[in-house]
Image (cartoon, helix red, strand yellow):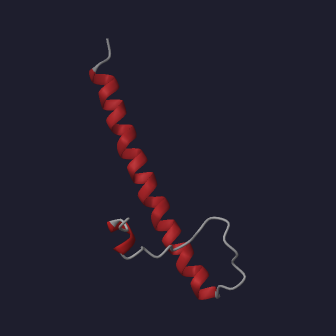
Amino acid sequence: MAASDDDDRPKKKIVHEIGQDLSLLSASELSERIAALKDEIARLEADAARKGASRTAADLFFKK
């Protein structure tokens, strides 16, 4: 059986894995990961706020 097309695609490098051993990382690498995680948190919070606003608008529109 042939390999799937997904196997041929380059894999995205994992920036950080929750619970990962940090002992082999330098202070610089830790700072980079902290910055990447802060950016991701900001992205998640913005999306949650946007979805919350959509929900609020829908609730007001359909309120009886």
Q: Residue furthest top?
A: 64
- Residue occupying the point 46% across, 63% down: 40
Question: Quarter holding the C terminus?
Answer: top left
| Rendering coords of residue 36 (x, y %) | 49, 72
- Residue occupying the point 37% across, 77% down: 10
Question: Quarter holding the N terminus?
Answer: bottom left
| Rendering coords of residue 63 (x, y %) | 32, 16
Q: Residue furthest front?
A: 1
Observer-nearest residue: 6 or 57?
6
Q: Does residue 41 sit above or below 27 in this rendering?
A: above
| Rendering coords of residue 43 (x, y %) | 41, 59
Observer-nearest residue: 1 or 49?
1
Q: Is residue 57 left or right of residue 17?
A: left
- Residue occupying the point 36% across, 31% down: 56
- Residue occupying the point 37% across, 41% down: 51
Q: Is residue 44 left or right of residue 54?
A: right
Q: Is residue 53 left or right of residue 23?
A: left
